[in-house]
Image: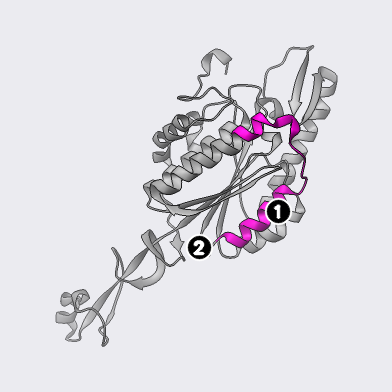
Amino acid sequence: MSLAALSLPLFSDGMNLNEQELIACQSLSHVIADRKTRAKASMSGHRASLVKGRGMEFAEVRHYQNGDDVRSIDWRVTARTGVAHTKLFIEERERPILLLVDLSHSLYFGSQLLLQAVQAAHVCATLAWSAVQHGDKIGALIASETNHLELKPRSRRQGMLQLSSGLIDVHQKQLNQFDNLPQDPDHIFKACQRLQRIAKPGSLVWIITDGHHFNQRCLAPLTQLKRHCDIGAFVITDPLRQGTLALPKQFSFPVRDGKQQLTLTRDSYQKWLDEQQASQHEFTQLMKQLNVQPKFIDAGKPLCDQLELLR
């Protein structure tokens, strides 16, 4: 795909984040199908729980017992059998959605169209808008080398408002103070530990990252998390880091990879590419141990052209 064929998403310049472009992600969220999962959390809402009671989805018919709601008596079965029967329904429960959004230095990279961090924010906003449509609570843990912003799950628009504000705030700090920010090699491991503590049973957890800062130490907290929550993962990639960008036979150009300034040439590019893909492979293997299949989102293409991956 040529650069001329690419167009920026609405209200986006590919580098900064603003409220309008995150609101525009609402138009993409309708493609995400509602998962047929059972919520275990004890809040009322629009998810089918494992608890049988009053609700909209029929579960079964059983013999009437003292204390049952007479409004649920199945008069047809009662008339046919001569014994009072009552209908049971699946109660509807609200499901917390938690997003672990990785805004590490390594995601502030873009060879075509968008920074990976911007694409990560677009994926995050689209998933969150889908949760709003399904009546779920939205929370997030936005992780960077210097800041872990924890947003407790909140309902509908309130949850979306705090998420948009948090993404814009952390992203802008990363851009404005890029050269002065200290490195914390354990910031993603600490984020996984924190996520494992704050996620309530029955939550759906989305991990949005480039995978560069996950390692085997993250497996323990994520394994604990997986025992009582569902986990999904999106890996934000870039054409240059994937080796899919068409390059001339001979080239020399500067690249900023995290806080490191590099000059890539034809000779050095392959070694650099191998390092990038090895890091990504480590994350994929980590997710495989959790029985999670990551989906890859390209920052070199608009998210609207990759919506099938969000289904």
Determine the residue positioned at 65% across, 29% down. Answer: 176
Please tell me whether mark 1 sits on a helix, a strand or a loop: helix
Q: Residues within 10 Å of mark 1 (few under 14, many from 20)?
A: some
Determine the residue positioned at 53% across, 63% down. Answer: 200
- Across and down, in percent, residue 246 comes to 68, 17
The quadrant in which the N terminus is found is: top right
Identified by mark 2, the residue type is Gly
Q: Is residue 39 left or right of residue 116?
A: left
- Across and down, in percent, residue 105 comes to 70, 35
Residue 186 inside the magenta-drawn segment: yes
Splitting the image into 4 quarters, where does residue 103 fall? top right
Q: Which numbered disc covers residue 202?
A: 2
Label 1, on which residue? Answer: 190
Q: Which numbered disc covers residue 108?
A: none
Please tell me whether mark 2 sits on a helix, a strand or a loop: loop
Residue 195 inside the magenta-drawn segment: yes
Identified by mark 1, the residue type is Lys
- Across and down, in percent, residue 123 comes to 52, 38
Q: Residues within 10 Å of mark 2 (few under 14, many from 20)?
A: many
Question: Which region of the structure is painted magenta?
Answer: 172-199
